[in-house]
Amino acid sequence: MINELDTLEVQMTHINVSSISKEDLNKFIAGSVSMPQDLTKSLSGIVYQKTSGNALLVTQFLQSLWDEDLLFFSFESKVWMWDSNAIDAKDIPDNVGVLLSGKILQLPRGCQYGMKLLACI
């Protein structure tokens, strides 16, 4: 499809998104959970290992940790907590399409049908 657009001389802008470094990922996670970076190294190390720093995979993986209560806020201790062993054992597809299609399949059937119709437009 991109080659077709090239032959039609459609103006396109290519954006290359490189992987997030391990250090930047730790800064991102530390900032997201409002904790010092030295306390989030265990979580960010696992997330980096699972995602190789792919920005889309990182955000989707963190969202899945939240959805599955593997990353949660403890109201008792007023701090974010996570289960490192369970997160480390969690499988993550290395293909973003597979990850997103799995999320779509979790939606109600009506939403899935609506998305199919919208994809045809």
Image: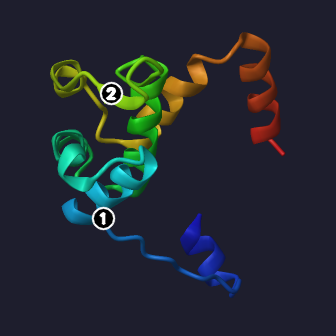
Q: Residue at x 60, y 81 (%)?
A: 6
Tag 2 residue:
81
Q: How many marks?
A: 2
Element class at badge 2: strand
Vertically, is 92 above or below 37?
Answer: above
| Residue type at numbered disc 1 | Ser
Cβ–Cβ under 8 Å for marks 2 and 1:
no
Spatial distance from mark 2 to mark 1, Cα to Cα?
Answer: 25 Å
> Quick check: 95 left or right of 115?
left
Chain-order first, disc 2 or disc 1: 1
* Residue found at the far top of this picture: 109
> Quick check: 106 left or right of 18?
right
Q: Residue 1: give its label.
A: none
In x, y percent, where is residue 55? 40, 56
In x, y percent, where is residue 71? 37, 27
Element class at badge 1: loop
Tag 1 residue:
19
